[in-house]
Image (spheres, rainbow, N blue to C red):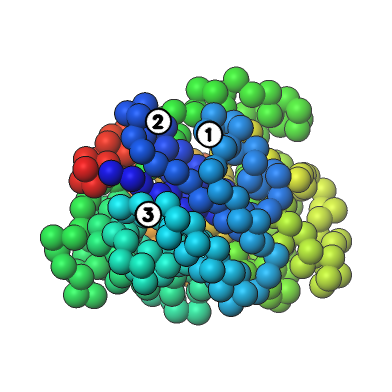
Amino acid sequence: MKIAIILGTRPEIIKLSSIIKKMEEDKMNYFVIHTNQHFSENMDKIFFDELKLPIPKYNLNIHSCSHGEMVGRMLIDIEKILLDEKPDIVLVQGDTNSVLAGALTSSKLGIKIGHIEAGLRSFDKNMPEEINRIITDHISDYLFVPTENAKDNLLDEGINRQNIFIVGNTIVESISQNLNLARKKDTLKKLGLAKKGYALLTIHRPENTDNPKRLKSIFEGIKKILKVTKLKIIFPIHPRTKKVFEDSKLNNYLNLDNLLVTAPLGYLDFLNLEENAKVILTDSGGIQEEACIIHVPCITLRNNTERPETVNIKSNILVGTNIKQIVWAFKKMENKKNDWKQPFGKNNVSKKILDVII
C-alpha cells in the first residue's frame, strides 16, 4: 500500500507528525506533499526541524494569494503528483485550503481519501474552514473523528456510519511526544516571564484579523484586562495580524504596558509558553484543544467553536469580541481550577488510524 499525506500549515504539520513518525517506524510506503500554505520559516520549516520529521518529498510553494487562486494552483500541482505517484490513499487533516485541494483532487482521480479530524462543525458557513470541512467530509472514504460529538455531526448529515471511526485526536500524541522537549527550552527566561505569571494571546483568524473593528474591540478588552491584572500578556503576532495593525493604524495597541509582542515562535517554545500560562486567549481551534489537554484555562475570541467539547467541560469560554465579555471571562478563568478531564483520547490515535487503513 502506498499512502500520500497532503499538508500545508503549522497545525497540520504538528497533528500529522505522530502519524508520519509511526509510518517511519513501521517502514510504510508513504510520501508527503507540502503545499507551503504557511510561508514564513517560523510558521513552517522550524516545525519539521523541531519535530524531527523528514523533509517532504514535494514542496509546492503556493502561498500569499486569494482563496480561489490558491486552491486552483494546488489542484493543478497536486494532480500531477498523484498521477505520477499513484497512491492507494490520500490522508488530509483538518480544514485548510490544502485539505480541500488534496481531497478534491483525489476524489476526481478515484483515489481513496482519509480525513483526519473529520466531523468538526462551527455551524458558521461564513468561515472558509467550515466549507472546507463539509466538502472534505462528504467526499472522504474514511472519516477519522476525535469525539462522539463529531461522529454525531456526520450522522446528522447522512454520512454512512460504516465510514466513521472514532479514534481521538492526534494532538494528544503530539503533545505527549514533545512536552518534555518543550520543558527543556529556556523560553520563559528569554522573554523575562515567570511560570503562571502571564497570559498567552494569539489572533490569526480572518474573521478577526480582516476586520479592524473586531480587532480594535479585542484589544480594548486586552487594554482593560491589563489594568485589572498583575499578569503580563504575551502576544506572538501572526504575520497577517501584524499587517492589519499596520494598515489600520492600530499599532498603538501593540505598545500597551505589560503587553509583550514577539515574532511567531517555534512549536516547542510555544508549547512551553502554553503549559506555563495562567490563561490563554485565542481564536485558534487547535489551541483550544491544546489548552484543554495541558489543563490551562482558555478564552476563545470567537462567537462559535468547532470544539464544543471544551466549552461543555468548562475548560473554555466563548466571548466573541465583546469588551465586557472578554474582561468578565478573564476574571473568571484567571483562577479557575484545572481539574477537568480532557475528551480527545489517548496516545494510540496514529495506530488506530493506520490499522483501519491497512
Q: Give the number of marks.
A: 3
Instruction: Select label 3 or label 2 by which is in front.
Output: 3
Q: Whole-percent x and y of residue 42?
A: 69, 43
Q: Marks 1 and 2: CB-CB under 8 Å?
A: yes
Residue 8 located left or right of residue 172: right
According to the image, label 2 marks what residue? 24
Report which quarter residue 200 is drawn in. Answer: top right
Q: Whole-percent x and y of residue 222?
A: 69, 57
> Dividing the image into 4 quarters, which one contains the N terminus?
top left
Say what secondary structure mark 1 lies in. loop
Q: Nearer the viewer, residue 277 or 245?
A: 245
Q: How far is disc 3 from disc 2 in space, using C-alphas?
A: 20 Å
Is tag 3's residue or tag 2's residue first in the polypeptide sequence? 2
Residue at the far top in the pictured view: 184
Task: Report the amino acid beneath label 2.
Answer: Glu
Q: Marks 1 and 3: CB-CB under 8 Å?
A: no
Say what secondary structure mark 3 lies in. loop
Is tag 1's residue or tag 3's residue first in the polypeptide sequence? 1
According to the image, label 3 marks what residue? 86
Q: How far is disc 1 from disc 3 in space, using C-alphas?
A: 21 Å
Kindly identify the residue that appears in the image at 30 percent across and 52 percent down: 88
Task: Report the amino acid beneath label 1.
Answer: Pro
